[in-house]
Amino acid sequence: MQALPERSTALPSVTGALRAVESLLLGRGQRTARRNAWSAVLADRRRAKDRVEALHVLEAVADRAPRAT
């Protein structure tokens, strides 16, 4: 069995390939808008995660506090 020749250049990453296709298909303004929208989605996810964590903390504190009767 014959050995395969080694590649001298690395294969492009999936991200790099997608960015290349994106640059061919979309205009600059559309790319910027899409990236801004994705950044907003990620920020919303972080805020939602923070809200859930804060809710857990508040519930834990409420469970420990003595209740007045």
Image: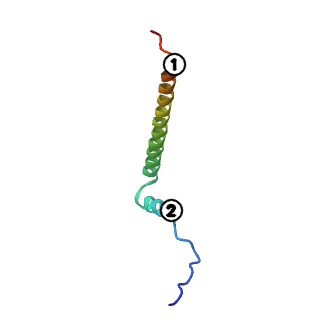
Residue that numbered label 1 is attached to: 65
> Which residue is farthest right?
8
> Which residue is farthest left?
25
Which quadrant holds the C terminus? top left
For image coordinates 44% across by 44% down, the residue present is 37
The front one of 35 and 43 is 43
Q: Of helix, strand and loop, which one carries label 1?
A: loop
For image coordinates 48% across by 30% down, the residue present is 56
Three-letter code for the amino acid on which mark 2 is drawn? Gly
The front one of 5 and 2 is 2
Of callouts 2 and 1, the N-terminal one: 2
Separation of marks 2 and 1 at Cα, in angstroms: 53 Å
- Tell whether label 1 touches label 2 (CB within 8 Å): no
Characterize the local packing of mark 1: few (<14), some (14-19) or many (20 or more) Cα atoms within 10 angstroms: few
Characterize the local packing of mark 2: few (<14), some (14-19) or many (20 or more) Cα atoms within 10 angstroms: few
Residue 48 appears left or right of 6: left
* Of marks 2 and 1, the one in the foreground: 1
The front one of 11 and 37 is 11
Task: Establish if 47 lies above or below 38.
Answer: above
For image coordinates 48% across by 23% down, the residue present is 63
Three-letter code for the amino acid on which mark 1 is drawn? Ala
Task: Establish if 69 lies above or below 59.
Answer: above
> Which residue is farthest bottom?
1
Q: Of helix, strand and loop, which one carries label 2?
A: helix
Residue that numbered label 2 is attached to: 16
Instruction: Locate residue 67, reporting x and y percent.
Output: 47, 14
Tally of numbered discs = 2
Residue 29: image tag: none
Instruction: Locate residue 50, reporting x and y percent.
Output: 50, 34
Instruction: Locate residue 11, reporting x and y percent.
Output: 52, 70
**In the rendered view, how is the structure colored?**
rainbow
Task: Establish if 11 lies above or below 4.
Answer: above
